[in-house]
Image: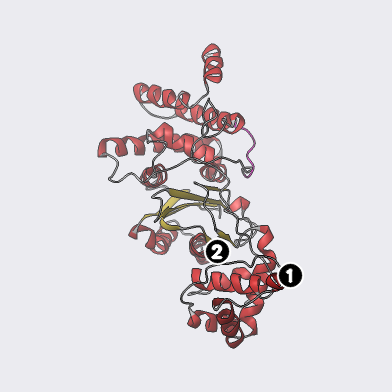
């Protein structure tokens, strides 16, 4: 079985909603999802290896198709959480590929689960420490460096024994009740603080601070300089901004920016950062206690006093759905869907599952294909 070349996903515009569905997946459905996930995973790991498989999990189109073929609702927030839970269960006992973390309090046990599997699979201490750092930084970035009104409640880390990894995490909006998925892959991360995601999926919001955008580079540098210059200077500048300090924009007759400074700032963390003297923004974020309030305060201070503007554009690049035949929520991305469907169809057909379950899984995949493509596929078969 051959597969198309895979690169880090390109950005696609489009928005659709992924509402919160309360409750849990029925046991009969979850058990079936686990069985299908195990069968498909076994075939794929044999055919393409763990590195390629992890890349697929970080591809939003592939992940969405994978969730659908397992039988879960395409438009539910559980698309992320239940699929990752089923995959974690399906891969239990393997040494070449492991999934740790999960939803709610389970996500907090991720470092312990990494340590358990590192010991079980004889991973080096360096490998274990790197995985813990990856887990912590992915969560820190999506909670603090990106402030889009979504609180993380799900964090899953999949990794192999060769240093490759994928992170799939999800946040929920307190205002809208809709979810947002964040996907990462080791092959696409040059640095944790600049354009690190393979995908961020969800409904676009206003006033989202994105310190990972390439245009935020100047703001990141100013934040590091502010911290290294001393807490007294930072405190003075932040208080000026919080009081509504005048800017040059007003003297030029332009409308001043009205941005929301956090009500409190973790000064203890900023003192710790000053003592540490970080050399770059990643080192600054890696310091424990430097969270959303400190990040926002430094970003606003850098913008309003020093002119280093961060990105206020929501970093959402993908939608949760694959598009619709009538263009709703946007036209189907055929190339991306064709790759996902072809790959998954081959995986299902080669999987060790019963004929009836195999047929139903392929039918669910074909339901995702636009009518003209489905007809073409019917002629081929």
- Left or right: residue 352 versus residue 301 is left
Give the CA distance from mark 2 to mark 1: 31 Å
Label drawn at residue 252: 1
Q: Is mark 1 on a helix, strand or loop?
A: loop
Q: Which residue shows up at 59% across the image and 81% down it? A: 240
* Residue 7 highlighted magenta (yes or no): yes
Taking 11 as reference, is 268 above or below it? below
Q: Where is 233 relative to 46, above or below?
A: below
Label 2 neighbour load within 10 Å: few <14, some 14-19, many 20+: many
The label nearer to you, 2 versus 1, is 1
Residues shaded magenta: 3-8
Whether residue 265 appears in magenta in the rendering, the answer is: no
Q: Nearer the viewer, residue 45 or 338?
A: 338
Q: In this view, does 304 lie to the left or right of 370?
A: right
Q: Position of residue 363 (x, y in %)?
A: 42, 23
Residue 302: percent from the left, percent from the top? 64, 73
Which residue occupies the extreme right position in the image? Answer: 252
Asked whether residue 1 is in view, the answer is no
Q: Circle 2 — which element?
A: helix
Sequence-first disc among 2 and 1? 2
Q: Mark 2 points at which residue?
A: 145
Quadrant location of residue 377? Answer: top right
Q: Nearer the viewer, residue 240 or 143?
A: 240
């Amino acid at each position: 079985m051959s597969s198309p070349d895979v690169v880090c996903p390109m950005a696609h515009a489009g928005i659709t909603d992924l509402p919160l569905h309360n409750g849990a997946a029925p046991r009969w459905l979850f058990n079936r999802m686990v069985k299908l996930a195990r069968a498909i995973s076994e075939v794929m790991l044999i055919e393409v290896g763990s590195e390629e498989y992890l890349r697929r999990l970080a591809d939003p189109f592939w992940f969405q198709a994978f969730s659908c073929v397992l039988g879960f609702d395409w438009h539910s927030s559980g698309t992320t959480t239940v699929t990752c839970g089923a995959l974690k269960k399906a891969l239990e006992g393997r040494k070449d590929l492991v999934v740790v973390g999960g939803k709610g309090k389970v996500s907090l046990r991720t470092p312990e689960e990494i340590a358990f599997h590192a010991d079980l699979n004889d991973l080096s201490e360096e490998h274990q420490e790197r995985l813990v750092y990856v887990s912590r930084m992915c969560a820190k970035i999506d909670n603090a460096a990106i402030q889009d009104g979504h609180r993380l409640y799900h964090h899953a880390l999949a990794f192999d024994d060769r240093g490759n990894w994928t992170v799939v995490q999800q946040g929920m909006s307190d205002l809208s009740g809709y979810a947002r998925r964040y996907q990462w892959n080791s092959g696409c991360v040059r640095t944790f603080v600049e354009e690190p995601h393979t995908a961020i999926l969800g409904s676009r919001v206003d006033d989202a601070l994105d310190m990972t955008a390439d245009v935020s580079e100047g703001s990141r540098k100013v934040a590091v300089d502010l911290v290294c210059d001393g807490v007294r200077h930072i405190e003075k500048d932040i208080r000026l901004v919080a009081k509504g300090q005048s800017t040059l924009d007003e003297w030029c007759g332009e409308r001043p920016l009205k941005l929301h400074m956090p009500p409190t700032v973790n000064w203890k963390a900023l003192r710790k950062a000053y003592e540490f003297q970080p050399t770059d923004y990643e080192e600054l974020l890696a310091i424990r206690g430097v969270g959303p309030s400190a990040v926002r305060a430094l970003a606003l201070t850098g913008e309003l006093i020093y002119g280093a503007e961060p990105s206020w554009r929501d970093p959402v690049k993908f939608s949760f759905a694959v598009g619709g035949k009538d263009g709703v929520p946007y036209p189907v991305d055929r190339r991306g869907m064709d790759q996902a469907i072809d790959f998954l169809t081959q995986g299902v057909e080669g999987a060790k599952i019963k004929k009836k379950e195999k047929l139903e899984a392929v039918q669910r995949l074909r339901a995702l294909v636009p009518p003209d493509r489905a007809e073409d596929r019917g002629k081929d078969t």
